[in-house]
Amino acid sequence: MQAIHSAPANNATAILQQDILSSEIATRKFLSTFTVKKFDTYFHIAMHMTAEETLKLHVANIKTLTEEQFRHFFSHFDQLSFKKGQAIISEGDLVSYEYFVLDGCLKSFYINDEVKMFILQFAMPGWWASDYNALYSGNRATINVDCVTNAAVLRISNTAREALCNEIPEVAYFFRWRTNKGYAAAQKKMLSFMNKDAKHRYEELMEQYPALYNMVPKHLIAAYLGVSRETLSRLYHS
Amino acid sequence: MQAIHSAPANNATAILQQDILSSEIATRKFLSTFTVKKFDTYFHIAMHMTAEETLKLHVANIKTLTEEQFRHFFSHFDQLSFKKGQAIISEGDLVSYEYFVLDGCLKSFYINDEVKMFILQFAMPGWWASDYNALYSGNRATINVDCVTNAAVLRISNTAREALCNEIPEVAYFFRWRTNKGYAAAQKKMLSFMNKDAKHRYEELMEQYPALYNMVPKHLIAAYLGVSRETLSRLYHS
DNA sequence: GCAATTGCGTGACCTACATCACATTTAAAA
DNA sequence: TTTTAAATGTGATGTAGGTCACGCAATTGC
């Protein structure tokens, strides 16, 4: 029986590897379980927090909101579930929402003319995903977002977010901070790309997200690293 | 006599190629002139707008501020001039400011262990530059910003910006928008990197910033494109 | 003006990674 | 369970672009 790598400890919404009593399930407003099949063994992975608790914890890491402010903030989100492989944003769409991942894994990616896929980002629990260019400018989407695994997300519309930012400066700060983090991450990935060879990028990724190794097919990891699947295969078999 | 490529027409702060009467100079609160030496000929490049006018135009493209709001906003900026080659942010610094380019060209870059330089961004008039990760998180700078040419900039401190964002939702919107644009640009550069070979990236850059060809040494362009200067040289001699 | 530095071009050679081709293993569908 | 499709491993071979080495041109400093 092979262990699944656990999520990094610093992840506020770390996925817990244990079964849950059904009575406990019943007490939760939100609870998503999905199963990972691995060598004929099923692992039940469950979140022990409601969506509200998860988002609250996430926001609290960045900015303190009053109980009232948070409740108002939270009331602008919808909760959705998606199946593995389901598309959330497709090239050419008008984009009105951004998505906060509660559970599972999304990917944002681009498909070029030769139908080759490039993954910009995996979105794990506690991360946000959208086509931010399309969302902000009103242009049609140029990148896609879909589900690598079954996923539970919260979504908020662009207009709701803008309204909230105008009402509550703390919320405005939160989103400014969040976008800034995204920018910094994009820059870091850029440097890693210019600077390091595929092997180093692979090791970097596995260090940051050991869970990915078992969670997503290798050809997706290759598409994230910007190498062919063959090269990736050779990388970790040597 | 060789012409200098002019800045793209959609650039709100396009550099004008003409001399200015000294009487006209005297009437301006801000006027920077610098000279580009090229085949023994000097071109005088001057901006016909004050710093205030330049920033106002820039902001107006994104969000309308009242006259009063803008004056308050502008009062939080300092104007500075730098010489070609001067450092603005160095690795290890604590970063408290971000910079709006009025005139000239900055670069933000990273130096790796083998003392190889990677340019993340050229900042032309109308663009912003800083180490945003360091600025926002309070960490020490990991990237550098310096002057490719003599430059005139406006700078605003992190605390002043935060205060303004809390006071004026329109200003908060402006900065949210701006960071978002930066993020989208970083993502676009990333895709261009994963997707296209050096030749295409070079052509893309020259299309977007024809002025760069004469403005900055080729090895800097190479460092931006992520290729060796030898490869870049071979690219446009074939 | 001359010296010193920095920038640029070009050949020879090397390497990381892509591509194609095919076998095999694993998971999904029926 | 059987069938089909998707994911993975591995060899052979091609190529974009790196590195080293050198010479010349253009700027900068004194």
Image: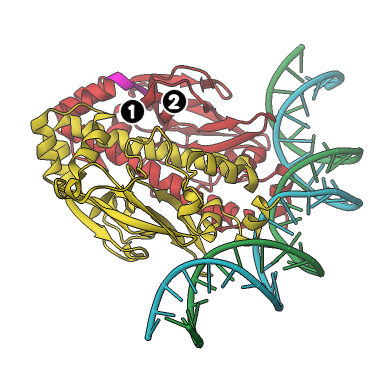
Chain colours: A red, B yellow, C green, D cyan
Q: Residue at x 63, y 48 (%)?
A: B198
**Where is residue B113 drawn, in percent x and y?**
50, 69
Check chain identity for marks 1 and 2: say if they share one.
yes
Q: Residue at x 28, y 38 (%)?
A: A176
**Where is residue A17 drawn, in percent x and y?**
48, 40
Label 1 vs label 2, nearer the camera:
2
Relative horizontal placement of residue A107, taking residue B92 as reference (left or right): right
What chain is tagged by disc 2?
Answer: A
Q: Secondary structure at mark 2?
A: strand
| A157 in the magenta segment | yes
**Where is residue A172 drawn, in percent x and y?**
22, 33
Relative horizontal placement of residue A57, taking residue A217 as reference (left or right): left
Q: Say which amino acid is labelled 1.
A: Thr
Q: Considering depth in this image, is A10 or B69 the residue closer to the camera?
A: B69
Task: From the image, tell me which residue sits under label 1.
Answer: A50
Q: Reply above or below: A161 against A4.
A: above
Task: From the image, tell me which residue sits under label 2.
Answer: A152
Q: Residue at x 33, y 28 (%)?
A: A50
Where are the magenta residues, as a range?
A152-159
What chain is tagged by disc 1?
Answer: A
Q: Considering depth in this image, is B79 or A82 the residue closer to the camera?
A: B79
Residue B109 visible in the displayed image? yes
Q: Considering depth in this image, is B41 or B120 the residue closer to the camera?
A: B41
Q: Secondary structure at mark 1?
A: loop
Which comes sooner in the sequence, label 1 or label 2? 1
Q: Say which amino acid is labelled 2.
A: Ala
Q: Reply above or below: B68 against B23.
A: above
Main structural element of the magenta stretch: helix, strand or loop?
strand
Q: Considering depth in this image, is A36 or A216 the residue closer to the camera?
A: A216
